[in-house]
Amino acid sequence: MGATERLRFRNYVVAQDLMVNREFRARCVSGSETECGAESALSEDIKVVDQWIVQHFHDTGHDAFRREIADYAVVRAGEWL
């Protein structure tokens, strides 16, 4: 799946590069005045990040997290219009 854009009368497709694994990370955003800020390690396995979240919750009671998912994209030129 990808997005199609038109630039200078030519279609371009931007899609996830399936040759490179996505990367995941989480950061604890719990706290009333300031965020905790603890971060998981970067991982290609979201289950590892989710396990870190559960362990951090168990250890601290913190229950709010920001998960980041990063991937790589490729662009391919399509047909001329």
Image (cartoon, grey):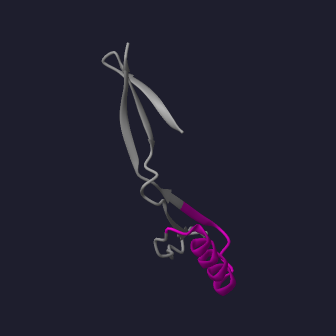
Q: Nearer the viewer, residue 59 or 30?
A: 59
Judged by its main secondary structure, the magenta piece is helix
Residue at the bottom extreme, as displayed: 59
Q: Residue at x 51, y 60 (%)?
A: 68
Instruction: State the quadrant of the C terminus.
Output: top left
Total marks shown come to 0
Left or right of 62? Residue 76 is left
Q: Foreground residue, 30 or 69? A: 69
The answer to whether residue 66 is above or below residue 6 is below
For the N terminus, the image quarter is: top right
Residue drawn at x 37%, y 34% as measured from the top left: 76
| Residue furthest top as drawn | 81
Specify start and end residues of the magenta stretch as a single range. 44-67
Residue 79 horizontal/vertical position (percent):
38, 20
Q: Quadrant of residue 20?
A: bottom left
Q: Position of residue 39 (x, y in %)?
A: 49, 74
Q: Position of residue 2 (x, y in %)?
A: 50, 37
Determine whether 69 is above or below 80 in the image. Answer: below
Q: Residue furthest left?
A: 8
Asked which quadrant contains residue 46, the reply is bottom right
Q: As displayed, is residue 3 above or below residue 66? A: above
Q: Position of residue 18 (x, y in %)?
A: 46, 52
- Residue 49 highlighted magenta (yes or no): yes
What residue lies at 51% left-to-right and 76% top-to-bottom?
38
